[in-house]
Amino acid sequence: MPASATKPLRVAVLADSDTRWKWGTLTAKRIAPRDIRLDGYLLRGRATPTARQLGEVGVRADSLREVTAAEFLRAMDEEPCDVLVLALVGGAVQAMLHGLRRVWEDRPRRPVVVTGYVGVVYEKLTDGLLLRHGADLVLANSRQDAERFRAVYEGVGADAGAVTEVALPFLGGAPHTGGHEPYTVVFAAQPSVPDTRADRTYLLNRLAGHARRHPEREVLLKLRSRPGEHTTHIEELPYQKLARGLGLPANLRLVYGHMGEVLDRTDLLVTVSSTAALEALHRRIPTAILTDLGVREALGNHHFVGSGCLASWDQLDAGHRPAPDEEWLARQGVAADGTYATAFDAARARIAELLGRPGGLPPLTPYYTPVTAPGYLPGVLARHHLGPDGTPLPGAPAADREPGPVRRAVRRTARGAYRHGVQRVAPVIRRMGEL
């Protein structure tokens, strides 16, 4: 490293869910200064994507395998790459940064490490950012996020130089030019927003009511996952189960698939706070952020204050179509003004500069260390079987062989039990607590 400028860059992506795999791989393709060879790694856990979910994402890698944290660190020691994208939850990013610092401590050169967020950052801003500090690039999906990220880092005395403004990597598609035949309304569901049976049933009933009120329209409920699958967030109450026995109208259908393909036929996108809203706004598709359950931080729709897109089902039933605020759009990285083609230029230039730096890159230096966070960091690392210095703990999952049939069976059973607990047992316990 760095590879010759005439050879493809070797880029590795480590992801822990279907959504982060999509973000990580598309980001890798957007920010690479030249052609790449893409090696994918899926971090083993509750949200490890299924083959169906990977197929729906529609992004292909030159190689792909499931790994534990220890197995991934072994791979990074034995299989060098030029750029590494960490598409993980914040705690996992921090663990990998410390583990990689140890793996690469004696190397004259190391890869450029990139991380960021899948979409809108509306909660745990400071916590998530400090857990990502130490990467060479911390990508911000909008001008607004870049300003917020730098303010957090500077506010704790951490180096903010890694913050790099880009845009969401999965924006694209043809602009909306008018109504389809039939006119199509899409509700973009979210796994955990809202999170109560009453609220989710309310939204399902309102969607069905809209379909009955407008029988000439096609109404689609766009689902993220099938029951038993997990995404970035846990879905305890899948809409598929709530819909059973409700007698949905014939023009209301439940659909899966690639969001971009669904948007190709969408005339009105409705959601509580899904990132799909930004995809739709990028394509100038009329978009409504629901206010029926309030505008609240817990729902994430507070992020859209000032967007001009807030509306209720009553207003939509009556024919209202929100008009987005252009200044708000410009600050959110939606790039509906045609600037998307240049949104990743700064990141590409920064990576090219780091790859060509004489003498290689300095060691990774996360903000959290055993000195700055002695009561927090060890727990973050231990969740990934790493010690305070980033070394795999004794008993960490084996990093030198593929899991045997017994280990695979135990893992499947454990995942099934976890999902049963999440989807069946936990809601019952909560209801008992409310009595």
Image (cartoon, rainbow, N blue to C red):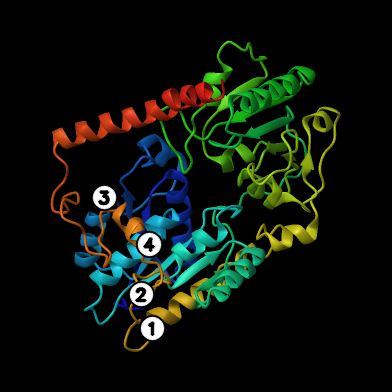
| Residue 6 pos. (x, y %) | 35, 76
Residue at numbered disc 3: 67
| Residue 179 pos. (x, y %) | 77, 36
Q: Nearer the viewer, mark 1 or mark 2?
A: 2
Left or right position of 231 against 9: right
Residue at numbered disc 1: 356
Residue at numbered disc 2: 364
The outermost residue toward the bottom is 358
Q: Nearer the viewer, residue 256 or 14?
A: 14
Q: Nearer the viewer, residue 216 or 84?
A: 84
| Residue 134 pos. (x, y %) | 42, 71
Q: Nearer the viewer, mark 2 or mark 3?
A: 2
Label 3: state its secondary structure.
Answer: strand
Label 1: state its secondary structure.
Answer: loop
Q: CA gap, disc 3 to disc 4?
A: 28 Å
Pointer 2 or 3: first along the chain: 3
Q: CA gap, disc 4 to disc 2?
A: 21 Å
Pointer 3 or 4: first along the chain: 3
Q: CA gap, disc 2 to disc 3?
A: 22 Å
Q: CA gap, disc 3 to disc 1?
A: 30 Å
Q: Nearer the viewer, residue 423 or 140?
A: 423
Q: CA gap, disc 4 to disc 1?
A: 38 Å
Left or right position of 77 against 307: left
Q: Amino acid at mark 1?
A: Gly
Query: Are the residues tagged 4 and 2 within 8 Å (C-beta)?
Result: no
User: In the picture, which quadrant includes the N terminus?
Assistant: bottom left
Label 2: state its secondary structure.
Answer: loop
The label number, if any, that marks residue 375 in the structure image: 4
Residue name at image x 61 percent, y 47 percent: 275
